[in-house]
Every structure is written in C-alpha cells, then in structure tokens.
Amino acid sequence: MVCFLGFLDVECIHLICGNRGTCQKIFMLIKHFSHIYKLLPINYIYSDFKFYFMYKIKFKDLLLNLYFLKQHQLFRFKVLSTISCTDFPELYNRFELTYTLMSIDFPFILNIKTKVSEFTNINSSSFFFKSAVWLEREIWDMFGIYFLNNFDLRRILTDYGFPYHPLRKTFPLQGFFQVQYNFIKKKIYYINNNFSQIKPVKIVNSVWNKLV
C-alpha cells in the first residue's frame, strides 16, 4: 500500500502494520520525512509503511537532497546501493533516474526519483558516494545520460568507439553492426545493418514467411 504521508498518525499505521512497536518507529521516521518536505524542495513523498520510502524531486535539486540525507543525524543514508534508469521515449523528459539509498543505523530504504531529458546534463553524485562512479558509467554507456564532474566517465560495457546506447527503447534489437570473419584475409569486419533505429526493416527472405 502506498499513501501520501501528510495525513497519517500512529493508529492509521497500526491498522496496516499490526505491530504497534514497529509502527511507532515507522511513525517517528515518517515525521522526520514530513520535516524534510518542509526543508527541501520535494514534490511527493510515499511509503509502504514497512521499510520503503520514496519521493520525487527535480534533477537540479539532486545533490542538495543527497548531501542532506547522508549528513543529517536523523537519517544517515550513507550507502548508495544503486542508480537505475527507465526510458519513456514518448515523453520529453524520457529518462527516470532512481537513486536507492540505505541507512546504516536504521533498517530503511529510500528511493529518490527524478526525470531528465536526453539533452540534459545531470550533476554527478560521485563526490558524496564513491559507488556512484561505476553506476553512472553504466547509465552513461547504456542510456547516454551525461553526468557532470564524474571522476571517470567512460564506457563500461561497450567499445569506446561505439556511438549508440543499447538500452534506449529506440535502439533496435538487432544492433547496428554485423560482425563477420574473413577466413582468407584473417580479419574481423564490421558491416552496417541497413535499417533505421526507429523502424527496423523486416527480413523478406525469412523461412517463417513460408509457413504462413
């Protein structure tokens, strides 16, 4: 169950959780998040009333939120577990970034979500979390989101000269190149596939067409 946190009390959480002791701890943390809503530029706050919290922000306020959550004594989210990305190609801000933070002192998980376009450069969080260096490298390689001030922003899964980003939904499943080995010249050749990225051309001479 997901709910907005502005209209909750201990009895409301107790009806959902069942354990009053656990609900009291969760309620105190929710009160802290309600204070965050007043201190930081946050759009929405949600919770499942167990160990998961999520809120949405604008991408320009990302570093401010990460620094506050890591250093504040009431939260101490000092571990950046992962950074995930989702592509919505029909939207202008097509990429939704999710930063998953974990607290060392409290058994809670926080997801911070923000949306950016493919033309937006977002500030790197590697200054606060060293684990963000590799996570941002992977997102840059797979989705093409550029992170400013990253210590080592290189491709991590594809070749350095590869000009595309495979996990974008506009990228064809067949890829842009075919790899062929010439036994006579004993060399590997890259041959371009003849179709666009948006609408791949169907193979006419397919054996499956004869079965229809």
Image (cartoon, grey):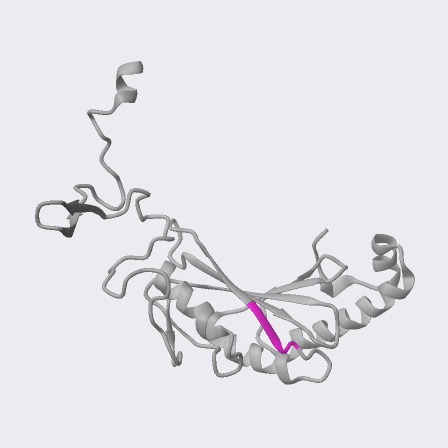
Q: What's the residue at 49%, 73% (across, down)?
A: 132
Query: In the rendered image of this protein, does residue 210 appear above or below residue 147?
Result: above
Residue 69 coordinates in the image, percent (x, y): 63, 78
Q: Nearer the viewer, residue 104 or 149?
A: 104
Instruction: Report whether 18 appears left or right of 64.
Output: right
Residue shown at the point (50%, 69%) measured from the top left = 58
* In the foreground, 184 or 162: 184
Name which quarter of the figure residue 149 lies in.
Answer: bottom left
Does residue 97 show up magenta in the picture? Answer: no
Q: Where is residue 174 in the image (x, y as percent from the top left)?
A: 29, 42
Q: Nearer the viewer, residue 87 or 5?
A: 87
Magenta residues (range): 77-81
61 lies above or below 83: below
From the viewer's perspective, is 71 left or right of 211?
right
Q: In which quarter of the image is residue 14?
A: bottom right
- Percent x, y for residue 97? 48, 63
The structure residue drawn at horizontal position 24% and vertical position 60%, both measured from the top left corner, is 163
| Residue 28 % position (x, y) | 81, 72
Predominant SS along the magenta part: strand
Q: Which residue is drawn at 48% across and 83% down?
A: 127
Would you say residue 78 sits in the magenta stretch?
Answer: yes
Q: Is residue 93 above or below residue 122?
A: above
